[in-house]
Amino acid sequence: MTEIRPAPPSAIPPSPDRIGEGQPDTARETANAGQRLEWLDICRGLTIVLVVLHHVTGAGLDHAPTGGKLYFAVLSVNRFTQLVVPTFLFLSALVFALSPLSRFSWRRYLSSRARQLLWPYVLWTALYLGFQIVTGVGPVAGQRLAAFWNPGLLQGKGYFHLYYLLLALQVALLLPFIRALLVRGREQGRRPLRLGWVALGAAALQLGIYLVNLRVWHLNNVGVLSLWYVLPLVLGTALGASPDRFTALWARRKGWLLAACGVAFALYLPSGFAEVLHRPLNVLAYTAGNWAYTVLAALVLSGVSVELLRYTSPLGEKLRHLLGRLGQLSLQVYLLHPMLLWVLDRLPYPKPAALQVLVIVLYTALGVGLPLAFARLIEGRRLSVWLFGR
C-alpha cells in the first residue's frame, strides 16, 4: 500500500497500562476511577479509527486526480488525522502520571514494558519481514538477517507502521523521569505546577530541540525520536498530576480549546498540503504548525471522549462500549490492519468520486473491524499473549 507519511509521521502506539495497581478504598473512588478509565479507552478507540483512516486516505490519494476537489478533500482528512501520535502519547503520559508514585518499581515496570512493547516489536518486525518476502518486496536471501536488525529493529523500518513501537519504547523510558519532575509532590499534598507555565516551558524546550536538530544532529527521521514529542508528553504528565485535572480544564475551557484547534488547523493546512505536494515549504512554520495543531487536537479529542460519557441513551451506551473495547484492543488493531489494507489495495478501485468516498469509508471500517474481531476471538488465550504481549 502506498503510504503518505509526513514529518513527523503518524501512527498508533500500544495502549498504556491501566491506572494504578491497587484498588481504591471506597465504592465512590472505584466508580470515579472507572469513569476516568472509560473516557481514556473511548479516546484510544476513536484514535485507532483515525489512524486506519489516515492510512486509507494516504492510499486513496493515489486514485484521486491530483489537484481536483476530491484530491484536496481526501488530503485534508489525511492531514487532519495527523493528530493520532500526539493523542496517544498524551494519553500514555496522563495515565502514567495518574498511577501511584509510591508503588512504582523499576523492575516491575521494565518487565511489563519488555512484555508489552519490546516483545511485540521484535516479533512483528520479523513477521512483517516475512510478509514482505512473501509478497515479493522484501530483501533477497543473504540480506534478510541484516535487514531485520538494521533498518528493521534499529530504525523501526520493518514495515511502514512499526517505527512507532521503537518510539514507544523510548517514551516508556522517558516518562518516569518526566513524572518525577512534574508530579512528585502529589502524595505530599502539594499543588501541581501551573499548567500555563508548564506549557510554555514545554514549548520552549520543543523549539530548542528543533534548533539542536537543525544545527547539530541533522536528522531527517526525527519522527521516531521521543524528544520530538515533548509537548504532548509534558502536557499529559502535567494534566495527570491530579485525577480530575483534565476534565476540569475541559469543563472550563472547551470553547477556547475548540476554537484554538480550528484556527491552528486552518493555519497549518497550507503547509500540510505543501509538504505532500513537494512545494516550497518553510520547515519551521510547518513543524510549529504541526505541533500546535496536533497537541490542541489531542486535547479536543480527549474532551470529546469525556463528552461521550454524558450520552445515556441505549445507542450512546453501545457506542461507548464499542469504542472502549476498541481502545482496549488498539495495539492488536494497530499491528494487524496494514496486512489487510495491503490486500484491499490490490482490488479494483472505482473512478467516480462518490464511489471513492464510499470505498474509503468501507476500507476504514474493514481495517478496524476485522482486526478487532480477531483480537476479541483470541482475547485471554495464550496465542494473544504470544502475538501481542497481552
Image: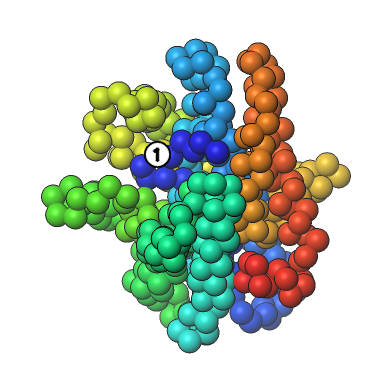
Please tell me in which quadrant of the rendered image residue 130 appears: bottom right
Q: How is the image coloured?
A: rainbow
Residue toward you, 374 or 72: 374
Q: Looking at the picture, how far across and down is residue 209, in whole percent?
A: 23, 54
Please tell me in which quadrant of the rendered image residue 166 appears: bottom left
Looking at the image, the residue that sits furthest to the front is 141
Residue 116 seen in the current view: yes
User: Please, what is the three-letter code of the amino acid marked with disc 1?
Assistant: Pro
Tag 1: Cα neighbours inside 10 Å, few (<14), some, or many (≥20)? some
**Which residue does the image show at 76% across and 56% down from the upper left?**
374
Above or below residue 131? Residue 107 is below
Please tell me in which quadrant of the rendered image residue 386 appears: bottom right
Quadrant in which the N terminus is drawn: top right
Looking at the image, the residue that sits furthest to the left is 215
Query: SS class of the residue under badge 1?
Result: loop
**Which residue does the image show at 74% across and 46% down from the upper left?**
369
Left or right relative to 346: residue 193 = left
Q: Looking at the picture, how far across and down is residue 190, in whole percent?
A: 41, 74
Quadrant in which the C terminus is drawn: bottom right
Left or right relative to 155: residue 209 = left
Residue 231 seen in the current view: no
Q: Looking at the picture, how far across and down is residue 157, in whole percent?
A: 43, 55
Q: Looking at the picture, how far across and down is residue 285, in whole percent?
A: 27, 34
Residue denoted by label 1: 6
